[in-house]
């Protein structure tokens, strides 16, 4: 018996990671640079307008705090007739 760790039936020895050549890595980087797509003028304009709309939407949403939203909701509920009133659920 030899010294060392136990050997199992399926094991075929130590496998070492193969070294990649530097040329292959550099050529892959060059290929990635070649495939970059340039957006058209209309696509860039569309994205700019979309970002502006998103900023406006965020400003509109952040304008009211949670407390203000709850107060508006309660005022709206108080103006509704009892037919549309939210029924109480649970004890109390």
Image (cartoon, rainbow, N blue to C red):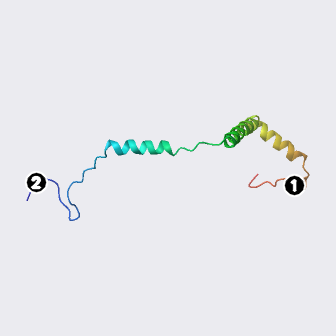
On residue 42, the disc is: none
**Relative horizontal placement of residue 9, taking residue 48 as reference (left or right):** left
Crowd around label 2: few <14 · some 14–19 · many ≥20 (10 Å): few
- Measured as percent of width and height from the top left, residue 33 is found at 48, 42
Circle 2: element type: loop
Q: In the displayed image of the protein, which residue is found farthest to the bottom?
A: 9
- Of 61 and 80, which appears nearest the observer? 61
Q: Residue at x 81, y 39 (%)?
A: 71
- Measured as percent of width and height from the top left, residue 37 is found at 57, 44
Task: Determine whether 88 is above or below 36 in the image.
Answer: below
Q: In the displayed image of the protein, which residue is found farthest to the left?
A: 1
Circle 1: element type: helix
Which image quarter: residue 89? Answer: bottom right
Crowd around label 1: few <14 · some 14–19 · many ≥20 (10 Å): few
Q: Which residue is drawn at 88% across and 45% down?
A: 78
Which image quarter: residue 68? Answer: top right
Task: Determine whether 50 is above or below 16 in the image.
Answer: above
- Measured as percent of width and height from the top left, residue 87 is found at 81, 55
Of badges 2 and 1, nearer the viewer stands 2
- Of 17 and 33, which appears nearest the observer? 33
Disc 1: which residue: 84
Number of numbered discs: 2
- Of 82 and 91, which appears nearest the observer? 82
On residue 3, the disc is: 2
Q: Nearer the N terminus, badge 2 or badge 1?
A: 2
- Of 7 and 72, which appears nearest the observer? 7
**Relative horizontal placement of residue 2, taking residue 68 as reference (left or right):** left
- Measured as percent of width and height from the top left, residue 59 is found at 74, 35
Q: Distance between the residues labelled 2 and 1?
A: 84 Å
Pick the quarter of the image with the N terminus: bottom left
């Amino acid at each position: 018996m030899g010294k060392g760790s136990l050997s199992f039936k399926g094991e075929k020895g130590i496998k070492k990671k193969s070294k990649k050549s530097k040329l292959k890595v550099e050529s892959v980087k060059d290929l990635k640079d070649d495939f970059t797509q340039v957006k058209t003028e209309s696509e860039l304009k569309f994205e700019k307008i979309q970002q502006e709309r998103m900023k406006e939407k965020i400003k509109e949403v952040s304008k009211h705090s949670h407390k203000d939203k709850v107060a508006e909701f309660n005022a709206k509920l108080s103006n509704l007739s009892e037919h549309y009133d939210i029924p109480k659920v649970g004890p109390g």
